[in-house]
């Protein structure tokens, strides 16, 4: 047995948060592969894997509570545990977004392919990388990396705007595909929201590291 | 000066959370009035008021941190503070949703009215009431009220489906109004998300009150 001292428990907490983040990144990568290859089996895998993400969140929250109750962290350690509670919750929501996209993919696999086939790979890869780096920035208290994540949000927004435009054009020329095209619209929006949520985490990191209130200045 | 003992601080924390909830409810009520009356001034008021909501969130989080650091709550008190941290964050996101809708309203006021004029009053009123009752349920540890909130989510979903259908019909008959109709689609979705977030809070309440894991069983 390893000793249950506070630094050790905080180190473990970081590892568990990184593991949860990895599960969310995986879900994002897989669900985009599913949409690009019309693979409903893979989409269903992502939907099913959300249960594991939910369980991890519950476990990490329990760890935070035990640390607060038994080790009474102060100052930076306390701020870290409080932030973990929020970021843990955010990661679970990101998992929900991947699951939502998975449900859209299952729907889309059940109807004929639309004429327009928007390419989600770039926006999804950017969003996935933002999720990864926002959590890396958090566990390493790296404000510089957090700022890079925030800067990437503009690129994701622009890709979203381009995809929206492509989909509006498709709706105008193929109104009979409206339902499927609106699902693709929803996929775009949820990928952008993943980027938004990673940006939220990055703002939190800067807030903690620099005591700066950047949280509510951008976006929202 | 009032004594700064733990029960007193927890009582104050509840009052502040209720006040924040009231601000969010106000924003929801106003933004829907703005959309129904095409009142861009009112929509801009909602957008501006989000800063106050953000400030309240930061203040409440600070209170939680001070309580954890200086009063080391345990058991039920600790669980309450931990849940407040998350629910406080949720309320701030709900404020963001009202602000997002406000931005859509400002856009819609700048373009000719669409032929279809969906009535958002019922879904908005239901969502607002869900927000109110979810926070009431939390501060009063009222699992019964929380269950009522969860039950209402189905009604909101159904209203959303009806509005979506109305808007899809409008897009098919008036493709030239596509951009404005997609904004109305977004308004519908964000009202439904408000209901989702209130449901999330209600699940948390039941989880706390009954130690039950209902959190991740529904929705997501």
Image (tube, coloured by chain):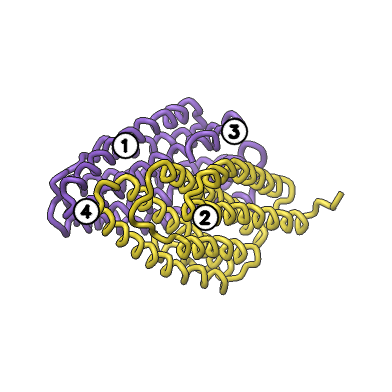
Chain colours: A purple, B yellow
Left or right of B211 on screen, residue A38? left
Q: How many marks?
A: 4
Circle nearer the viewer, 2 or 1? 2
**Lower position in the chain sequence, tag 3 or tag 1:** 1
**Percent x, y for residue B192?**
43, 58
Q: Nearer the viewer, residue A159 or A208?
A: A159
Q: CA distance from mark 3 to mark 4?
A: 42 Å
Report helix, strand or loop for mark 2.
helix
Q: Residue furthest bottom?
A: B144
Counting from the top left corner in percent of width and height, residue B129 is at 55, 64
Pick the front one: A66 or A96 = A96
Q: Is A69 left, or right, of A125 in this rendering?
A: right
- Crowd band around label 1 with a 10 angstrom C-alpha radius: few (<14), some (14–19), many (20+): some
* Disc assigned to residue A161: 1
Quarter assignment of residue A110:
bottom left
Q: Which mark is residue A115?
A: none
Which of labels 2 and 4 is toward the front?
Answer: 2
Q: Which residue is mark 3?
A: A213
Label at residue A178: 4
For residue A104, above or below residue A151: below
Residue at numbered disc 2: B33
Same subunit, tags 4 and 1: yes
Front residue of this view, candidates B181 and A103: B181
Residue A8 in the image, given as x and y percentages of width and height: 54, 42
For marks 3 and 2, give the CA distance: 32 Å
């Amino acid at each position: 047995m390893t000793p249950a001292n506070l630094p050790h428990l905080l180190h473990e907490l970081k590892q568990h948060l990184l593991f949860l983040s990895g599960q969310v990144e995986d879900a994002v990568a897989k669900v985009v592969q599913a949409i690009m290859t019309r693979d409903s089996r893979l989409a269903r895998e992502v939907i099913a894997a959300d249960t594991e993400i939910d369980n991890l969140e519950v476990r990490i929250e329990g760890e935070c509570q035990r640390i607060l109750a038994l080790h009474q962290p102060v100052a930076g350690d306390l701020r870290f545990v409080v932030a973990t509670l929020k970021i843990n919750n955010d990661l679970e929501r990101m998992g929900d977004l991947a699951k939502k996209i998975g449900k859209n993919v299952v729907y889309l696999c059940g109807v004929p392919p639309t004429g327009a086939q928007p390419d989600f790979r770039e926006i999804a890869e950017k969003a996935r990388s933002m999720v990864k780096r926002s959590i890396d920035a958090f566990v390493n208290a790296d404000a510089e990396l957090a700022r890079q994540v925030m800067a990437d949000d503009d690129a994701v927004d622009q890709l979203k705007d381009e995809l929206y435009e492509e989909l509006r054009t498709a709706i105008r020329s193929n109104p009979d595909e409206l339902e499927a095209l609106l699902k693709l619209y929803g996929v775009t929006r949820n990928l952008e929201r993943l980027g938004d949520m990673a940006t939220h985490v990055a703002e939190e990191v800067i807030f903690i590291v620099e005591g700066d209130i950047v949280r509510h200045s951008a976006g929202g």
